[in-house]
Image (tube, rainbow, N blue to C red):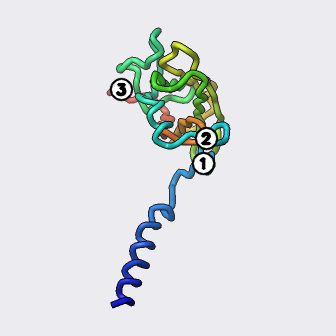
């Protein structure tokens, strides 16, 4: 009886550790810092609660949001790529970072914005895309040391008539 309980516990431990061993196709460039006592540390639930409504698009309205008709995940090389998010639940002084990646996980760039009093929307723009090759791209959104969003998009040779 003791042996079967020990075996069952061992199997349970291995099963519980499997998600942590999973191969992440898009590993984070930033690494989680243990604890939440260092500058830039924030707990995952708190970080997630600070950013909502992340959108990609070709234009930004005066209110800082991407209009529904401009939202897309297909961009033609040379177009500015806008990424906006609602940060109304983030404290003033919170730093939000967007890390841009190209095909084959090539790091393209990084941008940071600080939430200021009265600001509810942050906007990030990636311009200079004329030389970008068609393919799969993505943008990671970070609050402190926590990745809170991963937006995937494509550079295409021409815009589809249905868009």
The answer to whether the residue labelled 2 contacts the one labelled 1, judged by CB atoms less than 8 Å apart, is: yes
Q: Which residue is mark 2?
A: 41
With 139 as the anchor, is 109 left or right in this view? right
In the structure shown, which secondary structural element does the residue marked by tag 1 occupy? loop
Residue 85 in view here: no
Q: Which residue is mark 1?
A: 35
- Report crowding for label 3: few under 14, some 14 to 19, many 20 or more residues within 10 A (C-alpha): few
- Residue drawn where x is 57% and y is 23% of the image: 125
Residue 62 in view here: yes
The quarter of the picture where the N terminus appears is: bottom left
Label 2 vs 1, first from the N-terminus:
1
Measured Cα–Cα span from mark 3 to mark 2: 40 Å
Measured Cα–Cα span from mark 3 to mark 1: 45 Å
Label 3 vs 1, first from the N-terminus:
1
Q: Which residue is mark 3?
A: 163
Q: Position of residue 128 (x, y in %)?
A: 63, 25
Q: Position of residue 163 (x, y in %)?
A: 36, 26
Looking at the rendered image, the disc whose residue lies closer to the viewer, 3 or 2, is: 2
Q: What is the tally of numbered marks visible in this picture?
A: 3
Q: Position of residue 127 (x, y in %)?
A: 61, 24
Q: Position of residue 91 (x, y in %)?
A: 53, 24
With 134 as the anchor, is 19 left or right in this view? left
């Amino acid at each position: 009886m003791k042996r079967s309980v020990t075996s069952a516990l061992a199997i349970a431990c291995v099963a519980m550790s499997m998600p942590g061993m999973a191969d992440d196709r898009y590993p984070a460039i930033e690494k989680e810092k243990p604890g939440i006592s260092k500058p830039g540390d924030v707990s995952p639930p708190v970080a997630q609660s600070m950013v909502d409504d992340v959108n990609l698009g070709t234009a930004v309205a005066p209110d800082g949001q991407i209009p529904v008709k401009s939202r897309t995940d297909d961009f033609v090389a040379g177009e500015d790529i806008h990424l906006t998010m609602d940060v109304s639940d983030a404290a003033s002084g919170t730093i939000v970072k967007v890390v841009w990646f190209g095909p084959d996980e090539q790091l393209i760039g990084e941008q940071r914005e600080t939430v200021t009093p009265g600001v509810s929307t942050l906007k990030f723009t990636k311009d200079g895309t004329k030389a970008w090759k068609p393919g799969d791209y993505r943008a990671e959104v970070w609050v402190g040391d926590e990745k809170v969003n991963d937006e995937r998009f494509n550079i295409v040779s021409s815009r589809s008539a249905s868009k």
